Amino acid sequence: MVMISAGTAAGLSSELIILWVTSVYLIGGIFGILIPAYYRIPIPIASSLAAAVLFATAVSQVGLAESLGATIIAGIIVFLAGTTGSMGKIIELIPTPIVMAMVGGVFLSFGLDLVSSLESALLPAILMIGTFIIVTRFAPVVPPVLASIIVGVVYLLVSDVSFAGVEFSVEYPELVLPAFSFESFLIYGLPLILILIGMENPTAIALLKNEGFKDTPVNGISAINGFATAFGAFFGAYNTCTAGPMVGLFGSSEAGPKEKRWVGAILFGVIFIVAAPFYGSLVSLFEEMPGFFVAIIAGLALLKVLITTIGGSLGAETHKIGAMFAFLIAASEITILGIDSAFWALIIGFAISLLIEPQDFKFIGNKKQYNKHSA
């Protein structure tokens, strides 16, 4: 849903979005079966929603081939970080609040579009948002976004919106030759590395350990995610990683006995593989939907991500000033020297925090502590 919305918002063609979405789900499903089966741990595999938005923007700026080239480089770097056993150390060096702030700033436009729908389409917006709120409050076992989609579709049918253009299709991933450029790496490759290392992997790993999986292979998971990301890029997939929300679902006590929870993650992968070829039909359906419908669904689907990223950055106890600058720069959507705001948000936010808040960096804090003891 978010991937289709992000691609549509970036002006990508339906053919490109179908290739992208189909590949992401099919490759995610394959690795989503292999990894839990190997480790016997509930490690569902999907993709990063934050990366989806950044990738769509990158494709609109530098093209598909160069964006996939940046994906390959990012995947290789994450793979090497995992295989060399340095993932844990890298995670400690990256200011998570700044990475989260950058992602929250990129996602902010989706939240604003959700609110703007109240002005452009008041009645359907009230119905769909109201459904989301009511279901969340009184029927938490029902996916609130799905309920909103159903209510929205009913409204469109009653409003005589035509779906004559919707076509059923079966699509499969295609080999795409990547291209490489320094610009594409700055626009997408570097932010993707930071998202995987500083956001997606740590979130999933923390959730697993919190559920009692103390022997979670941190470096192994990171290495596999990097390899899967680089491999998938040859078929149009923008990244492959552990799915934090699904880890929370399949890793929790509600998923059954601890030693059998990995089976649920495998079933999740099977569903991805079976459903992947038919996502072209969903893209076709979304093309017939009014703009407000896509905006509302994308905004509701990203609501929890906005809470996590913005709340986790601006509400953090460290890197507050750097995170605020990162958030504002990413949300501004500025382009400097042909490079997107996401890159500048990370660089400027990090630099400002390093200058003003040096005590918040662990490597600086540890050095000061060492010098104090030495004295």
Image (cartoon, rainbow, N blue to C red):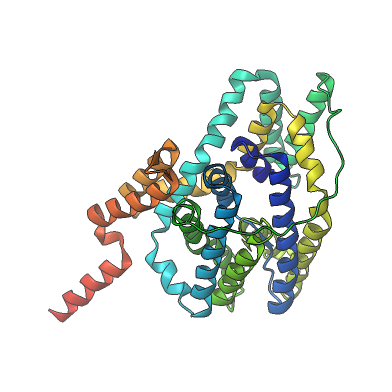
**Where's residue 226, x and y in %?**
57, 68
- Pick the front one: 367 or 76: 76
Residue positioned 49% across, 80% down in the render: 84
Q: Quadrant of residue 220?
A: bottom right
User: Measured along the vertical axis of the image, is residue 10 above or below residue 241?
Assistant: above
Visible residue check, residue 180: yes
Horizontal and vertical percent position of residue 162? 83, 24
The quarter of the image holding the N terminus is: top right
Q: Is residue 291 left or right of residue 343?
A: right
Q: Up-down: is 252 above or below 65?
A: below
Outermost residue to the left: 375
Q: How far across and how far down the image is residue 222, in percent?
A: 56, 71
Task: Name the quadrant of the C terminus.
Answer: bottom left
Q: Quadrant of residue 134?
A: top right
Judge by depth and name the residue closer to the eye, 372 or 224: 224
Residue at point 53% right, 61% down?
A: 196
Q: Residue at x 84, y 34 (%)?
A: 166
Rendering coords of residue 83 (x, y %): 53, 79
Is residue 210 shown above or below 40?
Answer: above
Count of picture labels: 0
Q: Please indicate, yes or no, whether residue 242 appears anywhere in the rendered image.
A: no
Foreground residue among 38 and 223: 223
Which residue is found at the position 74% from the left and 69% from the top? 261
Q: Quadrant of residue 86?
A: bottom left
297 left or right of 196 in image: right
The one nearer the camera, 260 or 105, is 105
